[in-house]
């Protein structure tokens, strides 16, 4: 890969707000990574599904959740969120379900690959923040979980 191609990839990272890009061509592999930009705090705005970045642990609840402390399960990559293994199948988890650490909670399709996303925390699903077939960003909260 020449420097012009690498610069073009770096520009894609900046333009689309990506944190990582990997390219493999003719046996050569190049991975470019940058630190995610920390979120800008928004005061008194309702939680809305859409591109945002948040830490895995949240000190205050989002939306109607009344717990003292809640956790989120975040998107580990950019892609398309699917809550069920097939369009006519039952969702992996629903609001009110109890999840275990390591349990599959959804699928994120990225570059025609279906990636099963596992819960990094255990608890009760208080809120599903994303609708099926909706695009998600890296670090975007997908589920609010009460420990």
Image (cartoon, rainbow, N blue to C red):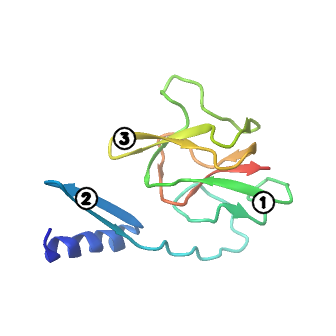
Toward the viewer: 94 or 118? Answer: 118
Query: Against 103, is 30 above or below?
Result: below
- Seen at 36% across and 40% down, the residue is 113
Q: Provide residue 69's location: percent of width, then percent of height.
A: 81, 59
Determine the secondary structure under disc 2. strand
Query: Against 71, is 10 above or below?
Result: below
Residue holding disc 2: 23
- Sequence order check, earlier mark of 3 and 1: 1
Residue holding disc 3: 113
In the rendered structure, are the residues bearing label 1 and label 2 in contact, judged by CB atoms less than 8 Å apart?
Answer: no
Determine the secondary structure under disc 3. strand
Q: Quadrant of the N terminus?
A: bottom left
Q: How would you rate the neighbour count of disc 1 (Cα within 10 Å): few for under 14, some for 14-19, many for 20 or more? A: some
Query: Against 70, is 4 above or below?
Result: below
Q: Nearer the viewer, mark 1 or mark 2?
A: 2
Toward the viewer: 13 or 88? Answer: 13
- Seen at 60% across and 31% down, the residue is 91
- Sequence order check, earlier mark of 3 and 2: 2
Q: Provide residue 101's location: percent of width, then percent of height.
A: 68, 43
Q: Provide residue 137's location: percent of width, then percent of height.
A: 48, 58
Query: Against 116, is 129 above or below?
Result: below
Image quadrant assignment for residue 25: bottom left
Residue holding disc 1: 61
- Label count reads 3
Q: Provide residue 128's location: percent of width, then percent of height.
A: 65, 45
- Seen at 80% across and 53% down, the residue is 65
Residue farthest to the front, as pictured: 27
54 vs 87, left or right, is right
66 vs 52, left or right, is right
């Amino acid at each position: 890969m020449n420097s012009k191609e690498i610069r073009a990839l770096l520009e894609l990272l900046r333009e689309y707000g990506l944190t990582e890009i990997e390219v493999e061509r003719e046996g050569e592999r190049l991975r470019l990574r940058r630190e995610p930009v920390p979120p800008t705090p928004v005061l008194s705005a309702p939680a809305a599904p859409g591109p945002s970045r948040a830490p895995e642990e949240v000190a205050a609840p989002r939306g109607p959740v009344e717990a003292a402390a809640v956790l989120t399960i975040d998107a580990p990559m950019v892609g398309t969120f699917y809550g069920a293994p097939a369009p006519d199948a039952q969702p992996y988890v629903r609001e009110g379900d109890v999840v275990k650490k390591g349990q599959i909670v959804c699928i994120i399709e990225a570059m025609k690959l279906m990636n099963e996303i596992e819960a990094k925390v255990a608890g009760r699903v208080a809120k599903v923040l994303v609708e099926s077939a909706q695009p998600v960003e890296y670090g975007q909260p997908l589920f609010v979980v009460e420990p």
